[in-house]
Image (cartoon, rainbow, N blue to C red):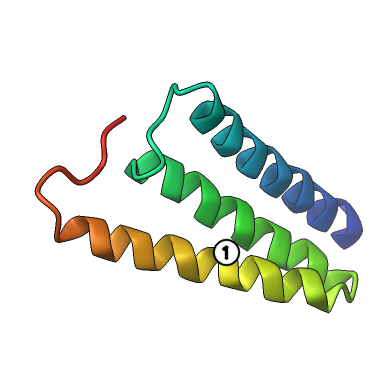
């Protein structure tokens, strides 16, 4: 399989992951502090970084890097809370 196809698949998986996370929170099926929500965002951001970097879309790389940093910060912060976010 050509590299471009693999990178495109990562891009679509990243977009789907972020949209799924947003949709679940918007429909109140998932809490914004839930670990699953943060993991969806982390994976989505990471996959989109791969795609964006390959295509030279560096502003998108930066935004998704910040997206990942926010997700990691939230996961660390929530580990210290007794309720830890709920599904």
Image quarter (top left, top right, bottom left or bottom right) of the C terminus: top left
Q: Which one is in front, 6 or 44?
A: 44
| 1 relative to 64 in the view: left or right | right
Q: Residue at x 84, y 71 (%)?
A: 54
> Where is residue 83 drawn, in percent x and y?
14, 42
Q: Residue at x 48, y 71 (%)?
A: 69
Dividing the picture into quarters, in which one does residue 67 lie? bottom right
Q: Residue at x 61, y 72 (%)?
A: 65
> Where is residue 37 drawn, in percent x and y?
44, 42
Q: Residue at x 53, y 65 (%)?
A: 68
> Where is residue 74 drawn, in percent x and y?
35, 60
Give the vertical position of 10 relative to 80 (above or below). above
Residue receiving disc 1: 67
| 20 relative to 42 in the view: left or right | right
| 1 relative to 29 in the view: left or right | right
Q: Which residue sits furthest left?
A: 82
Give the vertical position of 70 relative to 43 (above or below). below
Q: Residues within 10 Å of mark 1 (few under 14, many from 20)?
A: some
| 16 relative to 56 in the view: left or right | left
> Where is residue 15 drawn, in percent x and y?
72, 45
Q: Secondary structure at mark 1?
A: helix
Counting labels gives 1
Give the vertical position of 86 relative to 63 (above or below). above
């Amino acid at each position: 399989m050509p590299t471009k196809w693999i990178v495109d698949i990562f891009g679509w998986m990243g977009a789907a992951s972020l949209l799924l996370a947003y949709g679940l929170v918007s429909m109140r099926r998932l809490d914004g502090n839930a670990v699953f929500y943060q993991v969806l965002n982390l994976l989505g951001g990471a996959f989109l970084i791969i795609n964006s970097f390959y295509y030279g879309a560096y502003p998108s790389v930066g935004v998704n890097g910040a997206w990942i940093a926010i997700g990691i910060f939230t996961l660390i912060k929530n580990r210290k809370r007794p309720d830890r976010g709920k599904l």
